[in-house]
């Protein structure tokens, strides 16, 4: 009986022991963004929420889609984005980029190129805390609409 239980536990360990960054892994994440870092001349207080969904096409490479909401004193905006992340398996650091469409009510529409550098701190095999620093370069108004920020979020890998 002990041998059967041991074999069953080992088999469950191998099945559940799938690496977080393997091809075929799915990702869902949520972040708080725009936490006080800004060099933009028109923004003093900012706060945002971001939801991300992703899929690992290859080991260490994830295709992701994002939806975000950002609050600013004079106007709010909504963003939709598509991009990718590369994970350095040795240390949990990731590098991401893509393209983002930003819409602010009655004010402007913008296309931005976000770049982020972050770290995955794993709570367990599936859940991570992910702090990141990002730069969003505006293609519409580079000097006033480009932003630098800090975000912290949770990720679920399954």
Image (cartoon, helix red, strand yellow):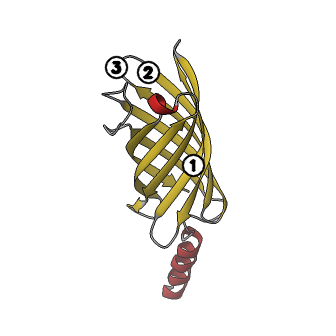
Real-space Cα distance between discs 3 and 2? 8 Å
Residue carrying label 2: 76
Q: Is residue 95 above or below residue 10?
A: above
Kindly state the secondary structure of the residue where label 2 is placed: strand
Q: Quadrant of the C terminus?
A: bottom right
**Residue 108 % position (x, y):** 55, 19
Real-space Cα distance between discs 1 and 3? 27 Å
Q: Residue at x 41, y 53 (%)?
A: 130
Kindly state the secondary structure of the residue where label 3 is placed: loop
**Residue 128 % position (x, y):** 42, 57
Real-space Cα distance between discs 1 and 2? 23 Å
- Find residue 113 and name its label: none
Left or right of residue 76: residue 26: right
- Find residue 97 and name its label: 1
Left or right of residue 75: residue 138: right
**Residue 91 % position (x, y):** 45, 70
Q: Residues within 10 Å of mark 1 (few under 14, many from 20)?
A: many
Q: Residues within 10 Å of mark 2 (few under 14, many from 20)?
A: some
Identity of the residue furthest to the front in this view: 143
Left or right of residue 36: residue 69: right
Of callouts 1 and 3, the N-terminal one: 3
Of callouts 1 and 2, the N-terminal one: 2
Q: Residue at x 41, y 63 (%)?
A: 124
């Amino acid at each position: 009986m002990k041998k059967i239980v041991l074999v069953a536990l080992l088999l469950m360990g191998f099945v559940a022991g799938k690496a977080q960054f393997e091809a075929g892994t799915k990702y869902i994440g949520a972040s708080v963004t725009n936490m006080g870092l800004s060099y933009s001349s028109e923004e003093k207080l900012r706060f945002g929420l971001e939801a991300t969904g992703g899929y690992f096409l290859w080991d260490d490479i994830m295709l992701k889609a994002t939806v975000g909401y950002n609050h600013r004193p004079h106007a709010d905006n909504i963003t939709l984005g598509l991009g990718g992340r590369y994970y350095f398996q040795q240390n949990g650091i990731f590098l991401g980029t893509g393209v983002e469409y930003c819409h602010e009510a009655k004010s402007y529409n913008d296309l931005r190129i976000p770049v982020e550098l972050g770290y995955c701190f794993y709570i367990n095999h599936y859940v991570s805390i992910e702090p990141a620093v990002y730069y969003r370069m505006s293609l519409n108004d580079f000097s006033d609409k480009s932003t630098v920020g800090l975000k912290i979020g949770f990720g679920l890998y399954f």
